[in-house]
Amino acid sequence: MRFVDEYRDPDLARRLADAVLARASRRWTVMEVCGGQTHAILASGLDALVRERVELLHGPGCPVCVTPLETLDRAQALVERPDVTLCSFGDMLRVPGSHGDLFGARARGGDVRVVYSPLDAARLAAREPARRVVFLAVGFETTAPAVAAAARWARKQGLANFQLLVSHVRVPPALEAIASAPDRRVDAFLAAGHVCTVMGTQEYEPIAARHRMPIVATGFEPADILQGLLQAVDQLERGAAEVEIQYRRAVRPEGNPAARALLEEVFEVADRPWRGIGTLPGGGLRLRGSYAAFDAERVFPEVTGAGAAESPDCRADAVLRGILRPPECPEFGRACTPDHPLGAPMVSAEGACAAYFAYRAPEPEEDPP
Amino acid sequence: MCLAVPGRIERVDEEEGLRTARVAFGGVRKRVCLETLPDAGPGDWVLVHAGFALQRLDEDAALELRGWLAEPESGA
Ligand code: SF4
């Protein structure tokens, strides 16, 4: 595929990895905060290529994983209403809440549907006026503009039977939380390429400056990730702490102005609980008052989530902040597996614990030489 | 979750009050909404996520990599 295949060239990856090793005078720790990158790193073994000089840590880059149990339980409760059709992305419907996943709710007769786009859910509401169509809206800034566009379209069409259960999260507050932790191990961040495609890179400038950390907006293919690492290591070696763009074919410093304007029109920044991390100030988005009629929480206030307590054995708080690597968790691959996740990073394929389980179990990780 | 796929716009339409495009992804064609990228037009390569075009892909930036491929020593 054009714009993709050339970045998968193994020879190029090796040369980039060698350049990283040659540039680093000591061992640095770099964190990516994007589930797609976490997946690519483990699937292609990029961490092993640079292990001698770079430790890769995996941040809370999976929006499905950080969606609170309370939200999942609320979605379950909505599905129990006979008039509700609940739609979301396939990943989201597989995540277990306190009482099983949403596909399970479908097996018990609930009307649960997978959609490719939030607009498909809005169109469904237009086609079936007798149903109440609720879209479970999860995702980073990459996905939120699509949801905003669907909400704006629904408002223009005067759809009264389309609502959003919003659990959108924003990346910069998560980087801020990790960067300011007293026990921080991370020297530099790779920022998520498609989040920056929408938002640009300005929000990262104060974080890089305040914490003296390089931040490189990076793509998803092996050559992208290794080049992003090379740029981050080069900055660390020079003592620089700048925001840089590796993923230049898709990221401009100003992002996508039309998408940002849509976000601004429909959503406002709000505090949001992140599963496994806790509430982050400004950590997410909620619908503006002008879109209250499309907000499932306001339209169905009686439907709440039970929000069962998380397992006390889960170390997700440490894993998601890069303090602990997934195989170091005592429950990893034992009590906690993708079929029976004890915590957030094991719930979706893009979560760090699930990615390690898929590509690194059962052999224990080797220590660096 | 944040996966986005490159495709090429073949045609731009107006449907149900939305600006949309027919986008070719290899041999597969899909309808993509352009509300997030209103000035994209036929022939443009765009990144598509959840049925929406996120950004136009920059050919010049993509060409930098071909420079890397051609010259093993560059940038190291
Ligand atoms: S392996 Fe399971 S229990 Fe351990 S931190 Fe990851 S999700 Fe939590």
Image (cartoon, rainbow, N blue to C red):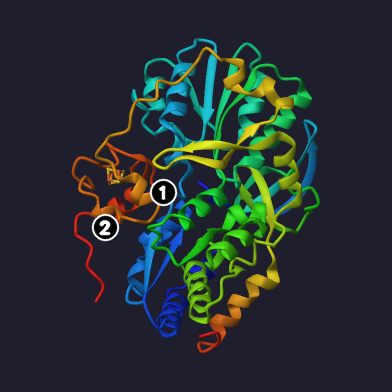
The chain that hosts pointer 2 is A
- Residue A30, position in %: x, y? 43, 66
Look at label 1 and name its amino acid: Glu
Secondary structure, mark 2, is helix
Q: Which mark is residue A130?
A: none
Q: Determine crowd level at label 1: few under 14, some 14-19, many 20+ residues with C-alpha closer than 10 A.
A: many
Q: Badges 1 and 2: C-beta atoms under 8 Å apart?
A: no
- Residue B27, position in %: x, y? 59, 53
Q: Which mark is residue A350?
A: 1
**Residue at image point 42% right, 85% down:** A22
Residue bearing mark 2: A360
A314 or B42, nearer to the observer: A314
Look at label 2 and name its amino acid: Arg
Secondary structure, mark 1, is loop
CA gap between label 1 and label 2 equals: 14 Å
Is residue A91 in view? yes
**Residue at image point 38% right, 65% down:** A56
- Residue A46, position in %: x, y? 38, 68
The chain that hosts pointer 1 is A
The relative height of residue A281 versus residue B71 in the rendered view (above or below) is above
